[in-house]
Image: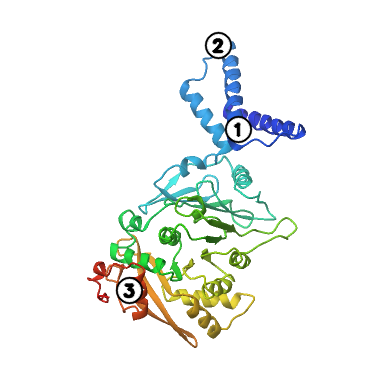
Amino acid sequence: MAAEKFRENIAANLTGFAHSRSEAGLPVQSSGERRTLARKLLADEIASHNQGRLRVGKPALSDGERDAIERSVMEALFGLGPLQELLEDERIENIQINGADQVFVRYADGTEEQRGPVAASDGELVDLVRQIAARSGLEERRFDRGSPSLNVCLPDGSRLFAVMALSHRVGLTIRRHRFKRVSMDDMVDRLGVCDRRLAAFLTALVLARKNIIIGGGTNVGKTTLARGLASVIPPYERLVTIEDTFELGLHEDSVAHPNVMALQAREANLEGEGAVDQAELVRWGLRMSPDRVIVGEIRGPEVVPMCNAMSQGNDGSLSTIHASTSRGVFTKLAAYAAQSPERLSLEATNLLVASAVHFVVHVGWDAEGRRAIDSIREVVDADGTQIVSNEVYKPGPDGRAVPGAPVRTETFDELVDAGLDVALLRGERWGRTP
């Protein structure tokens, strides 16, 4: 195929050109400069190819054929190859690949569809993943029998997880973040996750510097809600974000959040050294004078330093966690704490959580299959093996949150001081005038 031959020739020329610049002591080309050079080389390749066709009596490539070749070659060299078309479809929310020719997509409306192959073979799919890994960000990551999994953030913010050797075929799962920048108004109007009263309540929680953990199942919108809550944090505050893989993207919005230090966990190198987990990053983050610490997702021993951070003056922190119910968040926190190096007992964990976490917000699915906040708990205290909490919003008949137990009087006063519009909550069963 002409496109494949062009790609190989251009890739070889780019490599040779980069080597020549290095030997001459010249600076490394920027990504834009490499793209410009690649387009020039491709134009020369196509011109030479057309001359060859004309010499043997064949017509030159049509404009459509030329455009298709240019797109294919440039995507293979600088994009994500055959995956690029899927990632450019704004309707697609998740991509699931169980081998090069078994490609399934899930759309934002919940429907699913099988799509065409993304590679000629599983071997070619492995090569594609390696190319993606090499361009993914801070460093090249292995993907082979010795390191059979890969977790990486794509240029558009999507999250790719790949597996090989331990699976029956090479597998990829890509979770797309369709809403990289969202406000609380978006949570109401565009996404329908909550109504305006609940959005006002959540906004007041953030402005009152309450520590919040967002719970929910896989792909239910926890990260999107975290972005929405973070959108109301004043721009003068310094944020430190800690993630396994960059997903929040708060450091990419210099207007809303001009002072952000984003930290990402690192896997071990080929010698099994150099790994830095989220727990260690939380400790680092506390030395960076943060106003708030935001952990993208609690999934292990980082729960202990995270709670320590929340209870030692870094109020207003945010995090997410996988949990099937709002009460189940406490169980997951205890389980992770028990697995941490500190090996905290359940009683000690509950005391730590009660002193650190102010509210738990749970996201689920309503009766119509839409994402929705279904429960909010205010943490009150710890009593031995139990966390004492009030469910201030509980699931209603349609699965969406409705007012439950009243927040504590001192909490309500703090929210009013933070700007909570009491008039907006007059219809709430526990709303009261200041």
Q: Could you tell which of marks 2 and 1 lies nearer the N-terminus? A: 1
- Which residue has dot 1 on it? 33
Q: Give the number of the mark in front: 2 or 1.
A: 1
Judged from the image, the secondary structure of the residue bearing numbered disc 3 is: strand
Residue type at numbered disc 1: Glu
Residue type at numbered disc 2: Gly
Residue pictured at 48% horizontal, 80% vertical: 354
The answer to whether the residues at label 2 and label 1 have Cβ atoms under 8 Å apart is no
- Left or right side of 175 for 406: left
Q: Could you tell which of marks 1 and 3 lies nearer the N-terminus? A: 1
Which label was assigned to residue 158?
none
Residue pictured at 37% horizontal, 74% vertical: 414
Judged from the image, the secondary structure of the residue bearing numbered disc 2 is: loop
Quarter-of-image position of residue 396: bottom left
Quarter-of-image position of residue 241: bottom right
Residue type at numbered disc 3: Lys
Quarter-of-image position of residue 264: bottom right
Measured in 3D between alpha carbons, the distance from the residue under mark 2 to the one under mark 1, in whole angstroms, is 36 Å
Measured in 3D between alpha carbons, the distance from the residue under mark 1 to the one under mark 3, in whole angstroms, is 55 Å
Q: Give the number of the mark in front: 2 or 3.
A: 3
Q: Give the number of the mark in front: 1 or 3.
A: 1
Which label was assigned to residue 57?
2
Measured in 3D between alpha carbons, the distance from the residue under mark 2 to the one under mark 3, in whole angstroms, is 75 Å
The answer to whether the residues at label 2 and label 3 have Cβ atoms under 8 Å apart is no
Q: Which residue is the extreme one toward the left?
A: 427
Which label was assigned to residue 394?
3
277 and 328: which is toward the camera: 277
Q: Could you tell which of marks 2 and 3 lies nearer the N-terminus? A: 2
- Left or right side of 164 for 408: left
Residue 211 in picture, x, y percent from top left: 46, 71
Judged from the image, the secondary structure of the residue bearing numbered disc 1 is: helix
Residue pictured at 58% horizontal, 18% vertical: 47
